[in-house]
Amino acid sequence: LGLLGKQANIIGEGIDISGKMVSVAKQKYPDYRFVCASSESIPFKNEKFDYIICSASFHHFSDLDHFLNSIKHFLKADGRLIIAEINIPFFHNLYNNLIVSQSKEGDVKAYKTSELINLFQENSFKILKKEIIFQIQYYELSL
């Protein structure tokens, strides 16, 4: 946000479930609005966004269908949902069985690429771009 915000006229808003992370974000990017909220109760009312970015947080959401349906109300007609999520192809089951069950960070589930693709399609999102870069799955989606 910092460098990009200097190169373009960006109005940035963000949410995080952690009040501590919201405080860090407010200190680091004072020109943007940050609020403490969960993916299940997004506090924006009638606002529409060109881009909604969900970075390394999808595996913390307990109801992805609810989140994706909520996001539809916040995206402009030509808006984009950007998802950058963890990719654990070889240890996927181990991660979900051991790490997630012991997590104190709120991990719910790590998703396979096929699971995310099906989830996006089932929720009427078109995949405009998909890249797998080591431990990251990157998707650019539209309605």
Image (cartoon, helix red, strand yellow):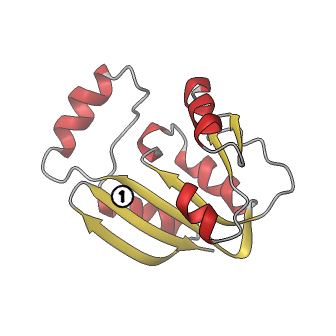
Residue displayed at 25% across by 28% down: 99
Tag 1, which secondary structure?
A: helix
Q: Whole-percent x and y of residue 123?
A: 57, 64
| Residue designated by label 1 | 115
Task: Using the image, determine if residue 55 lies above or below residue 63.
Answer: below
Residue 1 visible in image: no
Relative depth, front residue between 37 and 35: 35
In this rendering, position of residue 35 left or right of residue 1: right
Outermost residue, left side? 90
Residue 85 visible in image: yes
Quadrant, the N terminus: bottom right
Which quarter of the picture shows residue 5? bottom right
Residue displayed at 44% across by 27% down: 106
Relative depth, front residue between 92 and 128: 128
Q: Whole-percent x and y of residue 20?
A: 57, 24
Q: Whole-percent x and y of residue 111?
A: 34, 50
In this rendering, position of residue 22 left or right of residue 95: right
Looking at the picture, which amino acid does disc 1 mark?
A: Glu
Residue displayed at 46% across by 47% down: 58
